[in-house]
Amino acid sequence: MRTLAIALCWLWLGTAHAETRINAVIGDASGPAAADEATRITTHLTYVLARLQAVPSVRPDRRAVLAALARYIERGEYPRRTGDRYAGRRPWFVDDRGVYCAVGQLLVDSGAEALARSLAAEHPYGYLLDIDSPALAAWARGHGMTLAELAMIQPTYHEPMPDPEVIRSTVAGRADAFAIACARRSPPLAKVALHITSNDHAKLDASTTTPGPFARCVAETVSTLAFRSSHRIAPFAFDLALVLKDPDALFEAQLDTLRVDRDCAIGPGELARWATIDVTSNANVFDLKVTTEPANEEITACIAKDARARMAAFDVGIWDLHGTRYLEIPRVVSPDKLKGSLALAVPSYAARCSPEAPKHVRVTVSAKVDAPRFTIAVEDGTTEFRICVRDLLQTYLRTAYAVRGYFRIDADVQATYP
């Protein structure tokens, strides 16, 4: 999901010494500062990946995490810091474009997107070893990782020099947030003419020649943006014609991002297959209602909590907004996911169960909805070997397909490896 940025103001908390290291655990052991930021981060992540791959482990869940990290490095798209309250280098869990840091993307790729969003909201610039999150600790344990290893992965990102282009880009990038905040109180405009000045401490002052309360609100909000630099900068001024979207269009766009996360997909009771989310916001009420088919109160409450967080920017305002989304609830267990799990797990468990494991091990896994266990058939090797692989797979699959600690087979499935 690409979360709509709604943060409008940062309070600057001075620090005695700006951080310069790429990582809080191993410092700059991965290499010296590179010519550009992306190269420095790629170098660090590649170095850490090699160290983690060198740790002996046959756990398929750990191997899946490291494979996801390799894909993240290959993509080479990393968060960018804009305006925030920290000088020097600092972690950032997710940037204004919705690009996650390495650890955040590992959570998303593993199906724990809700946890990633929660950490991004509660600890946007936090160091992992400073974050007290039982859910993150449980995720790490369940995927064969330690918190120290995750912290070793976590890069810090450089502090951007607040020059006119950085300021211009930041203001333009937050246009949607300005439009929503100001349209809540005044009729919106499609464009606002801004004159922005900055002193040598990067304190902004925005004014507007566009008449009306909406334009004045935008200028006042832009003036609250604060930037900090470790160095004094030359004062500057520039004009910006800020193009703003209609709040109805922004509301619809945000509704389109709604989806049912895996973390809300199963629970006791009826297996809900569809969810209807209805959202109303006007001068009197912000109302979000969720119904599920078949009805399941626990799943309904989970979806509603997540949807309210995603639509929080559109709280009570002078506008009259309404929209409905009808969403399919994803299956936690599916044939494709099961096949992928077997491809990851079988080779590791075969080697673990016997140093002389058969070269070709054929495994078939099947289950019916609400079956208490997977039916697992291992076709090759000795009886002891087959039992060992079967039992390890059963434990692994029950863990892999649990949601919030609750395991339930929610689809008829069958998959064979290889």
Image (cartoon, helix red, strand yellow):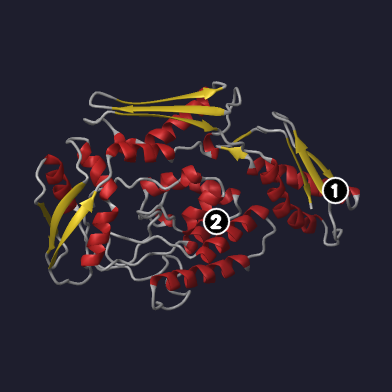
How many other residues sit within 10 Å of disc 1, few (<14), some (14-19) or many (≥20)?
many
Residue 377 numbered mark, or none: none
Name which residue lies at 90% across and 51% down: 382
Residue 191 can be seen, yes or no: yes
Q: Is residue 320 left or right of residue 334?
A: left
Residue 404 in picture, x, y percent from top left? 55, 37
Can you name the residue that lies furthest to the front here? 190
In the displayed structure, 188 sits above or below 160; it is above
Residue type for callout 2: Thr
Q: Earlier in the sequence, mark 1 or mark 2?
A: 2
Which residue is nearer to you in this view: 133 or 232? 232
Label 1 sits on residue? 386
| Label 2 residue SS | loop
The reply to whether callout 1 and callout 2 are in contact (CB within 8 Å) is no
Name which residue lies at 36% across and 61% down: 80
| Residue 366 occupies quadrant | top right
Residue type for callout 1: Arg
Instruction: Measure the alpha-carbon separation of dots 1 and 2.
Output: 30 Å
Name which residue lies at 67% across and 64% down: 56
| Label 1 residue SS | helix
Q: Is residue 164 left or right of residue 322?
A: left
Residue 243 in picture, x, y percent from top left? 24, 50
Residue 351 in picture, x, y percent from top left? 78, 59
In the displayed structure, 255 sits above or below 34; it is above
In the displayed structure, 390 sits above or below 283; it is below
Name which residue lies at 87% across and 58% down: 358
Label 2 sits on residue? 146
Can you name the residue that lies furthest to the right here? 382
